[in-house]
Amino acid sequence: MTLEDLGYHPELENYRQAESLDAFVVGRVISEHKDRYIVNTAEKEYQSEIIGKLRFTATSRADFPAVGDWVAVSEYNDDHALIHAIFPRKTVIERQAVGKQGEKQIIATNIDYAFIVQAVDRDFNLNRIERYLTICYAANVIPLIVLNKIDLIDETALKSRVDQVQKRVKQVPVYTLSNKTQKGIEQIKGCIKKGKTYCLLGSSGVGKSTLSNILLGKQSMKTNTISTSTNKGRHVTSHRELLILENGGIIIDNPGMREVGVTDATEGLEMTFDAITSLSADCRFKDCTHTSEVGCAILSAVENGEIDLSAYENYLRIEREKEHFSSTVAEKRKKDKVFGKMVKDMKKKNINNKY
């Protein structure tokens, strides 16, 4: 295996030279298990952990390695290494951390394309597709939509599903697939390019890990059977893992996500709802909230059917989440600043009392 097989490119080598990291081995994080990381280099695979300096200078979880990262490592045992530096990330797909206000969770880094996978039966949800599109566009990652489990519905129902997606989502390829019969798999394989990194996004049980195994040509990610009571796949993937495919493409499978909370994804929101974004320029007021104002071009478009009502409501919902996230981050920074000043004043007071 070469570094190029893992997606290494000249810009990364230029950074390595500029930062005087020549003494270290370059590798890519292929999986993460709490504070331990599996790093693949051109020569071998290492169980890795970060050095103390990286740990103590980290200001957030984003400062730690993530699956897809390029890192500089040094070997300290046969199969163990220390991570000394994280290379700059080209792209970062992230969402709002579940249960943690104002914090982000990195899904994967250095991604070129994202397969947004949905099952066409019970999991089908246009609003969720738009959420995934928003986090992809915010990360400057190219989205591809995969409607899976087409063996569970008839041709008429499938056509209806595809039409619904294409009506709401413009200029994003839509692929139909059956993991069971492998109908449509050649189209998926055909869009995977050597040296490019892809990730699979979707809810639990939509068939992401099975798709990974088919693309890989062997059983790598754990899968399970379909539940007879819910007709959904039983989700068993518990961690993210980077896999190298037979055709030279690179894919990252992800655990299913019940919640896809957006963060400060202004550009992503504008690209996902580009029709709404374009029309907003025609609103009477520059600060129009598109909810009740007279002369709102978007409300007018919803009334005359130019904009889908469900898409409009989803846009408002995601916009509120984005604003709430931004205000929460600002509040946290304010509190941290006040706390930092209090600690500084206490230290100064203790020093004065000492002398």
Image (cartoon, helix red, strand yellow):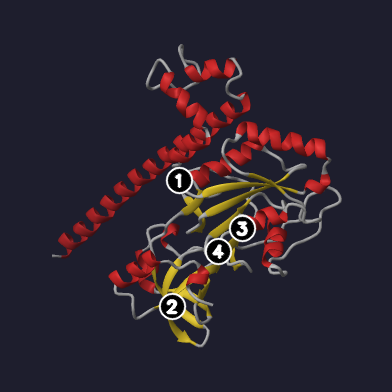
Tell me which residue sits at (60%, 58%) in the image. 192
For the residues labelled 3 and 2, the Cα–Cα distance comes to: 25 Å
The answer to whether marks 1 and 2 mark residues whose Cβ atoms lie closer than 8 Å is no
- 241 horizontally vs 177: left or right: left
**Quadrant of the drawing holding the C terminus:** bottom left
Q: Say what amino acid the circle numbered 2 marks.
A: Leu
The residue indicated by pointer 4 is 194
- Picture mark count: 4
Q: Say what amino acid the circle numbered 3 marks.
A: Asn
**Quadrant of the drawing holding the N terminus:** bottom right
- 125 horizontally vs 348: left or right: right
Where residue 104 sits in the image (x, y, percent)?
47, 50
Where residue 232 sits in the image (x, y, percent)?
78, 50
Q: Say what amino acid the circle numbered 4 marks.
A: Lys
User: Which dot, 4 or 3, sits closer to the camera?
Assistant: 4
User: Which dot, 2 or 4, sits closer to the camera?
Assistant: 4
Where residue 248 sits in the image (x, y, percent)?
58, 67
Tell me which residue sits at (59%, 15%) in the image. 304
Q: Identify the element where label 3 is drawn.
A: loop
Q: Identify the element where label 4 is drawn.
A: loop
The residue indicated by pointer 1 is 102
Q: Does residue 292 sit above or below 6 in this rendering? A: above
Residue 90, by quadrant, is bottom left
For the residues labelled 2 and 4, the Cα–Cα distance comes to: 29 Å
Disc assigned to residue 82: 2
Q: Identify the element where label 1 is drawn.
A: loop
